[in-house]
Image (cartoon, rainbow, N blue to C red):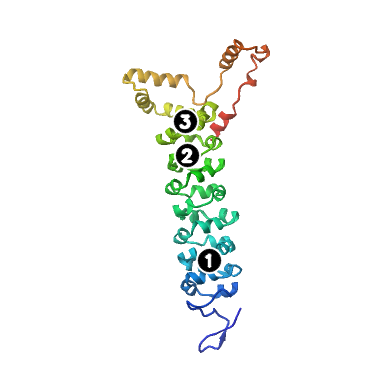
Amino acid sequence: MSVYPIGGYGLYSGPPIVTPTTDVSGFTSAEIRALSNRQVAALTTAQVAAIATDAIAGLSARQMKALSTKVSALTTDQIQALTQTQLNALQKPQSAALTSTQLNALTSGQLQGLSATVVAALSTAELAGLSTAHVGELTAKQLQALSSGQIAGLTSTQVGALGTDQVSSLKVSQIRAIETGDLQALSADRIAALTRSQVANFTYAQVAALQTGQVSLAQAGFFAIGAYVAGMQRIKKDPAFAEKSFAKWLREKDPVLIKKTVEAYNKVFKVVPSVPEKGIDNVLRDLANRRTVPKEFFGRYELFRDTGPLERAMAK
């Protein structure tokens, strides 16, 4: 470390003397660390941007806090030179002051190492400017730290960039916050990755906004199974609610008929759906009327029963 004169006390290995016009670009990591928090706080944005990338690591966690919102002056090279400890030392106002350019300059490791506190403090504008590559790298914990407002602020492209594991990790409140137009950006496998609870809590607007290709998952099985399980659980748990729903959507005014309909559903349909053997027989017989079906197929139910979608739906 350099030796600096201290008035009245001779030579002393202390912090450099820094004024608003001091050129700090030549300061070493040790000299940067030697600055007091007050000196760091007094640095101008130009001086902050002038700190050498190989010296930026000298800033302690307290010094990082002392920079206040001047962290927005850090260059992309300086950002990439910051350690995880330095990044996670940022306070909420500092996190909110970062620019999208700075966020996108973070390496994958730096991004995934950001604490939930730092991520939750990012502004909607920052997040809206985050690259799709970085969006796809956010951890489940980081995503769950986002507020409904932050989720709503994501662009359609960003929502579409979320992976299947990321989609299934979202809280119900976050799912409901996704804009209808953004929801349409989710590919079939992302829709299929939604949990039973997430699907059951779609808003009416979200359900109505689903595109044909997304709704067709119901025909494929998984989406329908998740909705079926959630619906039957609600009917059996709350028959009064089911009666109101039937009256509303079927436009039926006869309370006796509505009550018997719900009772019939409770009796006939099970919470855990299954493929009955009789149903498989009926399908094979119908198929046999149009083409030749080997007799060996009849009674071999394991050849046609696929419980995979059901097991995944129930697991979620």
Q: What residue type is labelled 1?
A: Ala
Using the image, tell me which numbered label, if any, was put on residue 296: none
Residue at position x 48%, y 52% from top? 127
Label located before the other in sequence (1 or 2): 1
Above or below, comparing residue 128 to residue 83 in the picture:
above
Q: Which of 169 and 104 is in front in this view?
A: 104
Label located before the other in sequence (1 or 3): 1
Front tag of 1 and 2: 2
Instruction: Give residue 195's position: percent from left, percent from top.
Output: 51, 36
Instruction: Give residue 159's position: percent from left, percent from top.
Output: 50, 44
Residue at position x 56%, y 21% from top? 275
Tell me the CA gap for discs 1 and 3.
48 Å
Front tag of 3 and 2: 2
Quadrant of the rendered image containing residue 301: top right
Q: Residues within 10 Å of mark 2 (few under 14, many from 20)?
A: many
Residue at position x 47%, y 39% from top? 183
Q: Which amino acid does label 3 sit on?
A: Ala
Q: Name the residue under label 3.
A: 230
Q: What residue type is labelled 2?
A: Leu
Instruction: Give residue 271's position: percent from left, percent from top.
Output: 49, 26
Above or below, comparing residue 69 to residue 136 in the picture:
below
* Residue at the farthest top position: 289
Residue 226 visible (yes or no): no
Label located before the other in sequence (3 or 2): 2
Using the image, tell me which numbered label, if any, was put on residue 183: 2
Tell me the CA gap for discs 1 and 2.
39 Å
Q: Name the residue under label 1.
A: 61
Above or below, comparing residue 257 to residue 37 in the picture:
above
Tell me the CA gap for discs 3 and 2.
20 Å
Residue 75 visible (yes or no): yes
Quadrant of the rendered image containing residue 205: top left
Q: Which secondary structure, mark 3?
A: helix
